[in-house]
Image (cartoon, rainbow, N blue to C red):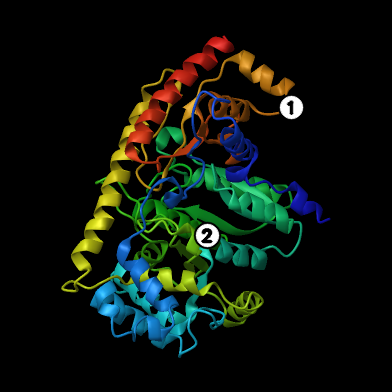
Amino acid sequence: MNQNMRNMEYAVRGKVVITADSITSSLKTNPSAYPFSKIIYTNIGNPHSVGQKPLTWPRQVMALVDLPDDVGVDNPNVSKLFPQDAVERAKELKSYMGGCGTGAYSHSQGIRGIREEVAEFIEKRDGGIKCNPDDLFLTNGASTGIGHILTACISGPSDGVMIPIPQYPIYSASLALLGGKQVGYYLDENKEWSASIEELERSLKEAKKNGVNVRAFVLINPGNPTGQVLSSSAISSVIKFCSKHSLILLADEVYQENVYDPNKTFISCKKAATEAGMLGKFEMVSFHSTSKGIFGECGRRGGYMELTGFDPDVQAQIYKLASSGLCSGIPGQVMTSLMVKGPKPGDVSYDSHENEKKTIFDSLKRRAVMVSEGLNSIEGFECNAAEGSMYLFPKVDMPEKAIQEAKKQGTNVDTLYSLSLLEATGICVVPAAGFGQEPGRAGFRTTFLPQEEEMKQAVELFKSHHEQFLEKYK
């Protein structure tokens, strides 16, 4: 077996989640086996699994695109079941497919008409900065695109990629699988999870000293698991650092719609690079996804990546890699189209669609505040506010006896704590160690995606469990 595969870890579906799934099975056969009736899954950004309702209009269009014409868009009774703007949008998407429908492969970069819509979306988002559809690849979520670029970067065991600590585990897991080196740069928890240029230079210098050929740099904005939203100047500093050291910038921007702090605004790396006069002067790939934002359509596996500054020959090799998978899933491509191009003002579905989106966003914003304030009210917890994304990453003071018990069990205290929380309350979180953190720090990552009443209950359970944990290990 490939030993790199054995060595890779993916914390968001690791030991704690496996235990949670086992408990769920136990509760089906013995409902009184635990002091709770169900697991509250806060381990992963999977909105629909914890109660977020799908947006109506995109699902209507998706259904019509999937249906054969005679029972869908061309059926004489279609207007009795679907609004006219959904029918027209479905016809438009079907026209992009040249009569093949959703059951056929598309171009390996994705359906051309949808890539053109994504290009228009990016241009509008960034204030008119041009986007070439030929530089876009539609992908199965952001994950596939990230995998393609890391595969292209890592050519041997001495190649490495700079990733933030804490980071999202797809980067550490993918690097382990590819046999590359993880080069961590620390985000400063005391400064709202910012990263100084001094820290970036330190990390790079140390990696080079250890014989690592650093090829790329990962920036996650808004942050996962940390929830910070970076300023234009902070992004510009990273861009200059990447350009100076000839590093490919991987801009993970999947939470660009999830900004809750009224004093913060999402600024794309592409826009920041343009404002710094550096667009096209270094290599950059940006990623977006239908899984996050307001859509939360994780199961559709829709997303895109945009390449800028790449040599055409290199881009051709990335195209070849994408071609080996034939194409991304067509339903995901369609959902990406609907994410970037919704109903227009004046369309019959426009107001209801925008109201549904606002309802979801406003609730997420309330939960972000409620849970962060709730965690900070617990003695021994410190938690930065979630300016964006879907997560909180509290630091928890652990008793020395618990730390020693974890060592005795051959695990870390984060996992010991998370398993204790799970078995006492039914709340499934991810140990902070799975994301990386400063030595001596402990904690966990939680989403605030379950519905408001459930998250209110979860905050109380976090508190009662912590008191019990301290009592047990005092």
Give the residue pinned by disc 1.
410
Helix, strand or loop for disc 1: loop
**Real-space Cα separation, disc 1 to disc 2, in angstroms:** 39 Å
Q: Where's residue 15, x and y in %? A: 65, 38
Q: Nearer the viewer, residue 459 or 77?
A: 77
Residue plotted at (47% across, 44% down): 195
What is the residue that sits farthest to the left in this orientation?
346
User: Which three-letter amino acid code belongs to the residue tagged 2?
Assistant: Cys
Give the residue pinned by disc 2.
242
> Which image quadrant for residue 271?
bottom left
What is the residue that sits farthest to the bottom in this orientation?
98
Residue plotted at (39% across, 47% down): 51
Residue plotted at (32% across, 72% down): 341
In which quadrant is the C terminus drawn? top right
Q: Residues within 10 Å of mark 2 (few under 14, many from 20)?
A: many
Label 1 vs 2, first from the N-terminus: 2
Q: Nearer the viewer, residue 216 or 356?
A: 356
User: Which three-letter amino acid code belongs to the residue tagged 1?
Assistant: Gly
